[in-house]
Image (cartoon, grey):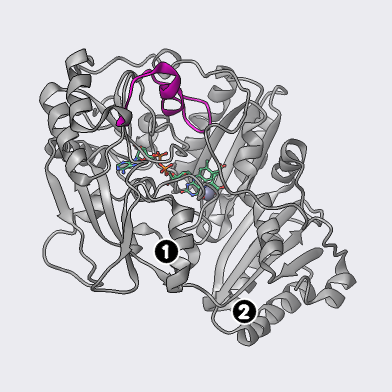
Amino acid sequence: MLSRLGAEFLAVGRISDRYFIRRCVTKITTNDGIKSPKPEYTSKRYSVKRGDFSCLEDRDIVFFKHLLDKNRVLTDPFDLEKYNVDWLKTVRGKSACVLKPRTTKEVSEIMRYCNEKKLAVVPQGGNTGLVGGSVPVFDEIVLSTELMTRFRISENNPAVVIAQAGCVLEKLDTALNQHNLMVPLDLGAKGSCHIGGNVSTNAGGVRVLRYRNLHGSVLGLEAVLADGTIFNGLSTNLKDNSGYDLRHLFIGSEGTLGVVTRVAILCSLRPKSVTTCLLAVPDFESLLKVFVVAKQRLGEIMSACEFMDSDSVACAKRNLGIEPPIQSRLYALLETHGMDSNHDEEKVDGFINQVMKEGLITDGILTSEPSKMKKLWEIRERLAEALRKEGYTYKYDVSLPFASFYKIVEVMRKRLPKTVITCCGYGHLGDNNLHFNVTTKEFDPTVLTRIEPFLYEYTKRCFGSISAEHGIGFKKRNYLYYSKNPAFVHMMAETKRTLDPNGILNPYKVLPDFEA
Ligand code: FAD
Ligand code: 2HG
Ligand code: ZN
């Protein structure tokens, strides 16, 4: 059903469903036909010094082929390319070997061998990470989880799924449908990202405000440490206070402390009633008020509260040919998840009536029809892809208090040179999470220096975070101090040294050069 509140909406604006025709595509791959030139090697662009690791030798390949089989050890430069370049096409390594284990035991054997030989390793899932953490900087071996795709519902708890690291998020979620369950995590890269990658980055996504992040829903976890030791913390208990809760060390550690091999996730019941609405909002002040009214009127059924500005939307139109059915300077995209459509409808009606009465919106679209909801979400979810088409994306993901939230986008517009194609803001409004993006035709170090460290200084002054959800990876490692004090960073480095004394797991990532 489109625009249940059609009559009222017509009073403030126009409604149309002519845009809900094309099918939504969620699959994001590295081989998506983008003809951008290969990025410069990371080690060169960022002048990185290689760590004291061994170089891969023929006898190592012999060992790996014996352990796995020859099809699961890639060494052909053509096959290696997609594992060496990130999704954004901004960082590039030169690994000569990709390993594809199927079991925890194989991961353990690989790590034991690499630790003994001092060979560096990058764990890689779907390679959709946005901070340069998932690809090698030099010649690190890539340990890909793409063949670790098994999962089962726990015998102890029917709401818990135990999944191997390589399960693709969307496939896992679709399979859970028959159990009336869903993965409590949803993001634009769901068609490609792996659950192990999600856990290792503590991925956020569009529904954090309702289902919280993975520190809450990952009940248990299994990981292989740098020396091959298997850390078995695969609990399915809702409550477990028996000792230190070490699983949290691996959630969000971006492959620097261990290779996550299996996770036990507490799933949510699939909602029976879902509504999505896209609202045209004239200014940021009104947007904040819309969010406040949504919290008050929708309460527990609100499952997402996103926003986009007109520059983001214009970029999607220009590069992907998709655009919203309504026009505005700012857009709010809200969603509800509930179990009773009558109850939810009443709440949504109350919300819409109030924001209209208060003059907070100028237009809107409301739908509960799956294909139409997907079309509305598509605009928001494909913004990263639209930006990437313009060339080089300078991508930022900050937590900011609302008083300083959108102001930084306006400040930045004035700071940046004319060579910039797009400078825009969008993100997870409900989580105070701004995605600030800038594009140029190709990488331009002068644009970078106009943004960094200025944006991080601003974020620090506002008591925000330089990484709300994407992680630190390679690109932000030397800015960690803007969000964590030196004693905190030092403790992180000590933890790393304890679990990985040779530093072979994902080197050059997360920790600042000084501490690493
Ligand atoms: P990868 O990119 O392969 O790896 C990411 C990091 O985790 C690397 O440091 C890697 O070494 C490590 N890693 C991967 N697997 C393992 C493992 N098994 N064990 C140990 N370490 C591992 N992120 C969000 O938080 N919210 C969003 O809304 C969001 N939307 C996105 C939309 C698009 C279009 C794209 C391209 C990306 C988006 N991302 C988002 C970023 C990215 O998808 C997430 O960070 C995701 O969790 C990465 O999963 P992956 O399997 O692709 O991991
Ligand atoms: C999203 O929310 C992702 O769409 C990507 O986190 C953010 O493109 C970005 O900056
Ligand atoms: Zn995001």
Give coordinates of residue 434: x percent, y percent: 55, 48
* Residue 170 to residue 39: above or below: below
Q: Which mark is residue 212?
A: 1
Mark 1 element type? loop
* Residue located at (18% from left, 54% from top): 246
Q: Which mark is residue 297?
A: 2
Image quadrant in which you'd find residue 282? bottom right
Magenta span contains residue 481: no
For the residue marked with disc 1, what is the amino acid? Answer: Arg
Image quadrant in which you'd find residue 34? top right
Q: Is residue 122 left or right of residue 332?
A: left
Identify the image quadrant of the C terminus.
top left
Work out whether residue 283 can be spotted. Answer: yes
Q: Within 8 Å: ligand 1 and the Cβ of disc 1?
A: no
* Residue 329 to residue 217: above or below: above
Identify the image quadrant of the N terminus.
bottom right
Q: Earlier in the sequence, mark 1 or mark 2?
A: 1
Mark 2 element type? helix
Q: Residues within 10 Å of mark 2 (few under 14, many from 20)?
A: some
Q: Real-space Cα distance between discs 1 and 2?
A: 20 Å
* Residue 369 to residue 485: above or below: below
The magenta region covers: 72-94
Residue situated in front as seen by the camera: 415 or 376: 376
Magenta span contains residue 74: yes
Work out whether residue 502 can be spotted. Answer: no
